[in-house]
Amino acid sequence: MKKTKNRFEVTLTFVTWVTIFLLWFLVTNLYDVSSLLLPSPQEVWKTFITIVRKGYNNISLWQHLSDSFVRLLWAVGIAFVTAVPLGLLSGYFRKFRAIIDSIVQFYRPIPPLAYYALLILWMGIDDGSKVTLLYLAAFAPIYTACVAAVNNVNQDYILSALSLGASQKDLFVKIVLPACLPNIFTGLRTAIGFSYTTLVAAEMTAATSGIGWMVIDASRYLKSDVMFVGIIIMGVTGIMMDSGLLYLENKLIFWKGKD
């Protein structure tokens, strides 16, 4: 039954995207729609092939992607390494949470562009300020997920372990951490998605490469076809990253959803 359901969902997804591209093709080919507003799929495909072969602004597409993903992966990696222990400790110890949580909750709702100018003043226009911006964008979702995960751990497991003489170390490593891993992965997926959206903001200021910069630069010169190429690339790569994390989650956290 599960396999049938999965196949049905895949079919629905496939039909949905085929319908979207078919409507896009029909609207742009049957009606007098300006390519400046909505380029046809053929135009976007030709532009994509040109960018793959010749690059954009004398920089190859692979270099644009590499620059963007290096910034993104550095930021998310550092955020994961710092946010997970801080989040778990904040959820486990109230006094620790009183110190860290208010700081995170203060900056979390602030739009990234609001403090990006300050980061540039402090750190310059190089990748340091961009990685820091993405780091701050990724830190809060992972931290919040970790705190919530600790608070949602089944208390029966903790009481049972304590009654059997488990130490605080064993309790944390063998009970709390495994129970929190599903939520940690969810927080990581959210952080990557939010950081990827912030990447455009980071690359629109004093950058000369990156997939986000390519879209912003194309918008200045009304190159709608290049903008569509960049947007589609960001969407596809975003889905690939999320699918990869979901695959790892299903493989590594096999106990998810089981009591």
Image: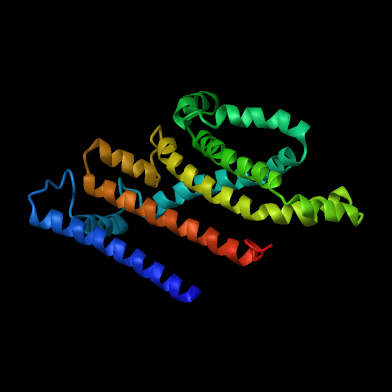
Toward the viewer: 131 or 153? Answer: 153
Question: Residue drawn 58% across and 38% down?
Answer: 140
Q: Quadrant of residue 10?
A: bottom left
Toward the viewer: 249 or 224? Answer: 249
- Please tell me how many numbered marks the rendered image carries: 0
Would residue 166 be seen by someone viewing this image from the given angle?
no
Is 96 left or right of 29, judged from the image as shown?
right
The image's colour scheme reads rainbow
Is 23 left or right of 213, judged from the image as shown?
left
Question: Residue drawn 20% across and 62% down?
Answer: 22
Would residue 73 be seen by someone viewing this image from the given angle?
yes
Residue extending furthest front?
156
Whether 157 is drawn above or below 126: the answer is: below
Is 153 left or right of 105, judged from the image as shown?
right
Whether 110 is drawn above or below 241: the answer is: above
The C terminus appears in which quarter of the rendering? bottom right
Q: Position of residue 80 (x, y in %)?
A: 63, 46
Question: Residue drawn 54% across and 36% down?
Answer: 128
Q: Position of residue 112 (x, y in %)?
A: 48, 31
Q: Where is residue 72 in the image (x, y as percent from the top left)?
A: 51, 46
Question: Residue drawn 25% across and 58% down?
Answer: 20
Q: Position of residue 235 (x, y in %)?
A: 38, 53
Residue extending furthest right?
165
